[in-house]
């Protein structure tokens, strides 16, 4: 490798570290992103032009064409995507990164026969890359609402684990046997793709933030492994940084749900149907109090403090702009309004923050769980929009519930609770919510956007 | 087992870097505020597109008559660059929204 290229890679590596560091602070995040992007550009351009290989012109043309096509596709997707669709987008891009690593592995397999040390990295790239690809595609399809139910084979966790074990043994066999057969590699590829599907398919919507973080981490690891294959530091370090970032977010999400990573992967919410039922429906009973938009508007108008609890339903209904409008009207009328953000509200880490940022909600009004919980007892009205499991008191007082022990927003201590939902259907975790039957709770049924618009027009008339 | 030892021996330097990079990654990213979770994730996502460097190497090293390698390499480059450009662009777009609002 020539010296200029090595130095370019070194610079790129440093920009990645600095970029990520700056991404961690609100004031410098944008700069960090641009710095990392510049480093990436340098690494790509350097790779194409600074080498000592004899390469026919048409290959340069092919590389240029691939970059041109891909860059346009990526750019268009990035500009057009709605902020509510961020989890889908991140899953999709994760999948692409994984697929790219797997493809590299397949091509290199043919060229490295007999070289056992290289073979270990190649096989690892194929396996991890393909699992990331198919897993991300399933996550993407689930988030897009293309798959209604979390499909679970009977004893799915045993099947999955055996399958994974089989995959490992098969990989070891390929490395050890020095096989030259391409068919065996395609079989391995197929097996890894199937495992990715099996791995994500039983995981419920409420666990999506964990899964997306984990897949993000895996893409990085796949990139790092291809880096080892080429002895390429920028790929190795870049990939590992992504791997660490993904793992940190994964564990942050697990802590937010008070569950272990193993529990999310192997014991998907509601997976054990018996506990879910025992923990919910039968016990609660009681009647549900319904309310109307005009009653709610009056109640909010005459209160001092309103806290809005947004959830995934807000994103689905695209109600982030109207909720901001509601907040502004209430603020004008002298009501103190803030938003309570649960760490796993939505379908990816920080999902609600991005949505509300899109509609220009003030930073300071978004309050984290630990800070808002003590404030609920001084709150007149809590307005829950499209959130469910993150306000379910079963997490506190029902040891048989699957979400028992998960930190939640203590909306119960507020004076009045208004819950907007489409219907009485339980949330993604499939757990009945006792909060709906609480004396202080009124249900405001309907599409979040339509309901909030009604509230706004009622408030304007007052 | 001998393969494994051989692997460690021949990649010792890389393994050092790998382990140190893990520590750097954890130190750099820990304690990040929840507001930035999504931008961090999509920014990291763009970084994982660094795999495109490998995809380009595949194409550069490929025998010009090996159409399978060239095709797979081509697809890998396209997917990688989508990841890179899309990831950085969308992160930038997101962070712009955060900024606008601060005033």
Image (cartoon, coloured by chain):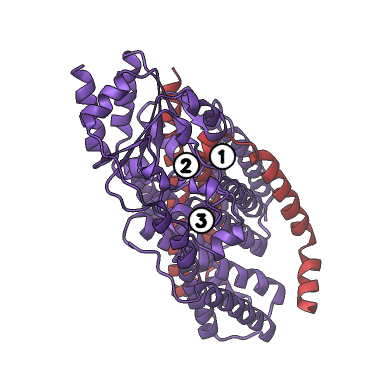
Q: Is residue A385 above or below residue B8?
A: above
- Judge if badges 3 and 1 mark residues of a common chain: yes
Instruction: Note the chain letter of the red one.
Output: B
Which is nearer the eye, B54 or A61? B54
Mark 2 vs 1: CB contact within 8 A: yes
SS class, disc 3 = loop
* Subunit bearing disc 1: A
Give the residue number, with chain letter if any, for mark 3: A401
Quarter-of-image position of residue A300: top left
Counting from the top left corner in percent of width and height, residue A219 is at 55, 57
Residue drawn at the location 65% of the way across and 74% of the way down: A119
Give the residue number, with chain letter if any, for mark 1: A36
Q: Is residue A430 above or below residue A372?
A: below
Counting from the top left corner in percent of width and height, residue A249 is at 58, 47
Which is nearer the eye, A36 or A248? A248
Name the front one of labels 3 and 1: 3
Rounded to the nearest angstrom, the CA distance separating label 3 from label 1 is 44 Å
Quarter-of-image position of residue A323: top left
* Subunit bearing disc 2: B
Give the residue number, with chain letter if any, for mark 2: B88
Which is nearer the eye, B101 or B59? B101
Name the front one of labels 3 and 2: 3
Q: Is residue A24 above or below residue A54?
A: above
């Amino acid at each position: 490798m020539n010296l200029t290229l090595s130095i370019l890679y070194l610079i790129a590596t440093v920009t990645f570290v600095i970029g990520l560091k700056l991404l961690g602070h609100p004031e410098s995040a944008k700069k960090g992103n641009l710095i990392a992007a510049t480093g990436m550009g340098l690494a790509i351009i350097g790779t194409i032009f600074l080498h000592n290989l004899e390469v026919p012109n048409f290959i340069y043309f092919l590389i240029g064409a691939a970059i041109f096509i891909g860059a346009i596709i990526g750019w268009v997707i990035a500009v057009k995507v709605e902020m509510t669709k961020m989890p889908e987008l991140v899953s999709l891009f994760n999948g692409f990164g994984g697929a790219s690593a797997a493809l590299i592995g397949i091509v290199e397999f043919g060229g490295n026969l007999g070289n056992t040390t290289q073979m270990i990295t190649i096989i690892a790239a194929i396996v991890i890359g393909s699992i990331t690809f198919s897993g991300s595609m399933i996550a993407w399809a689930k988030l897009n609402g293309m798959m209604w139910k979390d499909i679970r084979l009977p004893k799915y966790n045993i099947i999955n684990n055996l399958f994974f074990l089989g995959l490992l043994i098969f990989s070891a066999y390929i490395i050890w046997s020095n096989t030259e057969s391409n068919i065996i590699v395609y079989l391995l590829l197929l097996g890894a793709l199937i495992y990715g599907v099996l791995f994500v398919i039983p995981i419920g919507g409420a666990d999506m933030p964990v899964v997306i973080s984990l897949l993000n981490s895996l893409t990085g690891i796949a990139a790092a492994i291809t880096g080892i294959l080429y002895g390429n530091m920028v790929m190795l370090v870049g990939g590992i940084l992504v791997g660490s970032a993904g793992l940190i977010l994964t564990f942050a999400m697990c802590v937010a749900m008070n569950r272990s990573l193993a529990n999310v992967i192997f014991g998907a919410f509601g997976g054990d149907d018996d506990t879910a039922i025992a923990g919910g429906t039968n016990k609660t009973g009681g009647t549900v109090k319904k309310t109307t938009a005009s009653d709610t508007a009056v109640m909010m108008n005459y209160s001092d403090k309103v806290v809005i609890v947004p959830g995934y339903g807000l994103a689905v209904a695209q109600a982030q702009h109207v909720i901001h409008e509601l907040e502004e009207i209430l603020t004008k009328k002298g009501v103190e309004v803030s938003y309570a953000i649960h760490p796993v509200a939505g379908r990816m880490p920080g999902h609600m923050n991005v949505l509300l940022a899109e509609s220009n909600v003030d930073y300071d009004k978004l309050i984290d769980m630990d800070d808002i919980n003590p404030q609920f007892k001084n709150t007149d009205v809590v307005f829950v929009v499209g959130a469910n499991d993150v306000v379910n008191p079963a997490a506190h007082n029902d040891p048989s519930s699957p979400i028992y022990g998960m930190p939640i927003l203590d909306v119960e201590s507020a004076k009045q609770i208004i819950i907007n939902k489409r219907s009485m259907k339980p949330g993604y975790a499939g757990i009945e919510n006792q909060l709906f039957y609480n004396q202080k709770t009124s249900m405001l049924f309907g599409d979040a956007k339509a309901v909030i618009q009604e509230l706004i027009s009622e408030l304007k008339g007052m | 087992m001998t393969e494994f030892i051989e692997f460690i021996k021949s990649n010792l330097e890389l393994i050092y870097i790998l382990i140190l990079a893990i520590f750097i990654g954890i130190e750099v990213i820990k304690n990040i505020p929840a507001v930035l979770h999504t931008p961090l994730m999509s920014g990291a996502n763009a970084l994982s597109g660094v795999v495109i460097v490998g995809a380009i190497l595949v194409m550069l090293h490929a025998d010009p008559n090996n159409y399978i390698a060239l095709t797979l390499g081509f697809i890998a480059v396209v997917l990688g660059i989508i990841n890179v450009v899309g990831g950085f662009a969308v992160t930038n777009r997101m962070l712009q929204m955060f900024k606008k609002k601060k005033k």
